[in-house]
Image (spheres, rainbow, N blue to C red):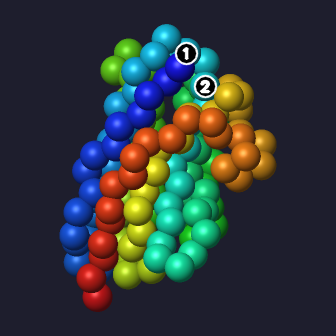
Amino acid sequence: QVQLVESGGGLVQAGGSLRLSCAASGRTFSNCAMGWFRQAPGKEREFVAGIAYNGATTYYADSVKGRFTISRDDAKNSVWLQMNSLKPEDTAVYYCAGSYSPFITSMTDHEFNRWGQGTQVTVSS
């Protein structure tokens, strides 16, 4: 089983940057696609970004393309989400997630069976 712990959230002004980290434990990390989701108050959880097991393929929601970058380092059992040009609408709790598959096909939470506890990102205008 993979256990996930996020860090790096905080308060930032619009236009600023944050880097979220996800530390994973477990022997199957390198075989799994990984993703980031977010949930704003009163809204459903939504897919933000994902990365295939080998790092060769990345996936992004249209709302973050060109601003966010996902990366992974299996030697460090870590996944990161670099967030640039942040907007107030990016405010949410961000969750790291592990898939049961090496690739991401639907970009929905149905593909993920391991979740971190979440980290708050607040972007002020």
Q: Residue at x 41, y 62 (%)?
A: 93
Question: Which secondary structure, mark 2?
Answer: loop
Which percent across, then down, holds residue 21? 33, 42
Q: Give the label on residue 66, or none.
A: none
Residue identified by numbered label 1: 28
Query: In which quadrant of the rendered image does the C terminus lie?
Result: bottom left
Q: Amino acid at mark 2?
A: Cys
Vertical side of 37 occupied by 97: above or below:
above
Say few, some or many: other residues with alpha carbon within 10 Å of mark 2 (under 14 / 14 to 19 / 20 or more): many
Q: Residue 72 appears in which quarter of the rendering?
A: top left
Q: CA distance from mark 1 to mark 2?
A: 7 Å
Q: Residue 13 appears in which quarter of the rendering?
A: bottom left
Vertical side of 15 occupied by 79: above or below:
above
Tally the marks: 2
Q: Residue at x 50, y 66 (%)?
A: 39
Please report contact status of discs 1 and 2: CB closer than 8 Å, yes or no.
Answer: yes
Vertical side of 20 occupied by 102: above or below:
above
Q: Residue at x 51, y 49 (%)?
A: 36
Q: In screen coordinates, is 93 left or right of 123?
A: right
